[in-house]
Amino acid sequence: VSRMDLVDSRASRNFWVYINKDKIWSATGVSKERNQIAADKFNLEAGLLWHKVSRENKFIGLKAEILSFVPVTNEPIEIMWVKITNISCRQIKFIPIAAIPIYGRSANNLRDHRQVTSLLQRITLNKFGVIVKPTLVFDERGHHSNKTYYFILGWDEKGFPPEYVYPTQEMFCGEAGDLEAPTAIINNLLPDKTLGIQGREAMGALRFRQIILKPGQSHSYIVLLGISESQAEIKKCIYKFRDLKKVEKALKENKAFWIKKSEQLNIKTGDKNFDNWLGWVSIQPTLRRIFGCSFLPDFDYGKGGRGWRDLWQDLLALILKNPYKVRPLLLNNFCAVRIDGTNATIIGKSPGEFIADRNNIQRVWMDHGVWPLLTLDLYLKKTDDYGILFKRLPYFESSCTGTVLEHLLIQNLRPFYNLGEHKYVRLEGADWNDGLDMAKERGESVTFSCMYAANLRTLVKLMLKTKRKKLRLSKLLFSSPPRVTAEKRDFDVSIIVKKLERMSQEMTERIRKQEWLKEGFFNGYYDNKGRRVEGRKNGIMRMCLASQVFAILSGVATDEQVEKIIQSTKKYLWDKKLGGYHLNTNFQKEEHDLGRAFSFVYGDKENGAIFNHMNVMFAYALLSRGFRKEGMEVLRSVYQMSINTARSKIYPCLPEYFNAEGKGMYAYLTGSASWFLFTLKEFSPDFICQG
């Protein structure tokens, strides 16, 4: 669901308390009884991968604490632990009802064949709740048999099952009610056994036996929300978590696991607030490796999976934690490179599983060849495992194989044979900024031409490190255009080195000579009409942060130019109110010859947001060039914006960006977390104490 769906949808993990017809309370606050909800006192307490919502109502006389977490012992469940406490001075008799709808099919069916796919639902009543197993996975390209079970199961702290179960929304809500005012609750009705339950919208509504609580007394309920392909696994979950002590143990294990995970980098600054915040940031790369980038409330586009660029940058943090464990991941990822130097854009869940593109749109992002080498270079610095360069791997969608070094060469040579009219790498579908996606014909990225020039120098360094005089590579690897074939030949390393050095130097000198602007920064792009994008135009200053960051990081910018860039970014991109660097100045017009980004409102997403990924890379670039004070100031600004919760309004983390109001957007998905950790580990984190 998207952020708007969360607000509008009636579906939730609800827990009702029925005292009498005048006292009906949703312990989660999802009810049409707005007067009672308004009287609730609410509190949120959260730690790494768990959170607890507390809600109390003096009119009702009860307090509810609902704690949610996922066990780290591989059970396919979320545990919802509900504790109800009598906060009045009298005993209270009530009926507790857990109520969670079960959707149980593809997200595509929300707006496509929703009613039809409900007819596939097969519902089994279990002693502890409801298990749903649709007959088919509905797909008009080819339906296939479904193997997945969806279930809601529950019991009280003594292991007693629910007294009654409502297995369908129709039975629970009634014709006149809905999930916020279900007829079964409002009228205190028992399940109508005359109603059919198959082929309906499923419901996990569990009505527990009536209970009496004395003042100060509490009673707990455990609800499991699960997805599994094994009935035996479901039974094991029931057996294990029916004991409240085992739930308590699982929660302790959960907390210990994620705290340990967050402390793997072992960065301590002496600033308690910063160190605590950093613990949350430290797990962001792990979360994104598990979940990918989609299916988040803010991130309401895409169909899941982990993107190519994200994947390589997330490995930066993982390499710092345990470089030797990353080797299989590196090798797996290289298998997504094609023989023409392009690559699959989505990495699947299983080793060797790749998806050619997102949303069935064939595109090439011109920056994709940059990231694998940056990541591998860090791995080699930490391990000296230069043998990995000669590991033979397949190419995506081909029967050809080649060494890792060959995979790297084809990815970084291809762009130099795909130059635009100004002799920079064509922009194609976009570079790292996906919003620059409307300049396929004549667009050029000076920004990543800088990085490809730097990558060729890195490849030279790696080949010299191997101390090999000859390399057996694909025969046409250095042809025009370069490509991989099954036929191999021996190449003299000294000749390859000279060729790469010449290509790198020519690109570097061209950028320094042609793209340095009198305003004191680099131009980074040409649009689809072949026009220079940055600089002063019609009285409006146009400047992009990425253009400067990659010029600095790649070594294209001289030290003197770096000093001028620092002054220019402070002058044109620094937001004095929010305290961060904007991704670009306000172009004040749409740019249909460059990309969709400039049709977004200024200050959001790729059009001028305070984009943390680029801010952190700016800091890293400055630090790598010896501009320590300025680099640390950029890092400090990112941290300060993140912990300003009154404005950022987000869980502790490093969000993808801050919008024009300073609100943090897109929680864990951003690659900036990896770059932040990478930067701290590479350079001393004393900036916090000094700040």
Image (cartoon, grey):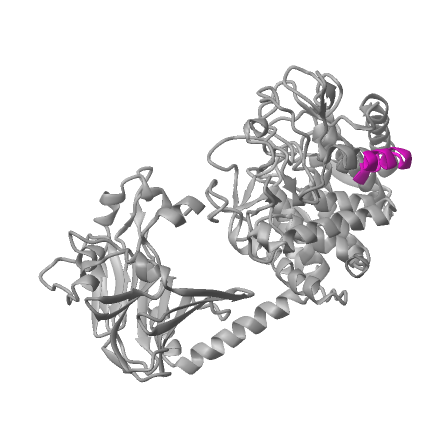
Query: How far across and down, in percent of the image, does residue 88 sit?
Result: 34, 78
The magenta segment: 552-567
Q: Is residue 72 above or below residue 411?
A: below
Quarter of the image with the C terminus is: bottom right
Location of residue 590 by image quarter: top right
Q: Is residue 263 left or right of residue 178?
A: right
Location of residue 188 by image quarter: bottom left
Count of numbered circles in the view: 0
Residue at horizontal 83 percent and vertical 35 percent from the top: 567
Q: Is residue 573 above or below residue 440?
A: below
Q: Is residue 172 above or below residue 458?
A: below
Q: Is residue 651 left or right of residue 509?
A: left
Location of residue 384 by image quarter: bottom right
Query: How far across and down, in percent of the image, does residue 173 sit?
Result: 20, 56
* Residue 476 visible: no
Q: Nearer the viewer, residue 576 or 159?
A: 576
Q: Nearer the viewer, residue 326 or 436?
A: 436
Magenta: main secondary structure equals: helix
Query: How far across and down, in percent of the image, does residue 654 sit?
Result: 63, 52
Q: Nearer the viewer, residue 556 or 417?
A: 556
Work out which residue is located at the far right of the displayed protein and give it. 560
Q: Is residue 22 left or right of residue 257?
A: left
Q: Nearer the viewer, residue 589 or 578?
A: 578
* Residue 427 visible: yes
Magenta span includes 321: no
Query: How far across and down, in percent of the image, does residue 479 sit?
Result: 73, 26
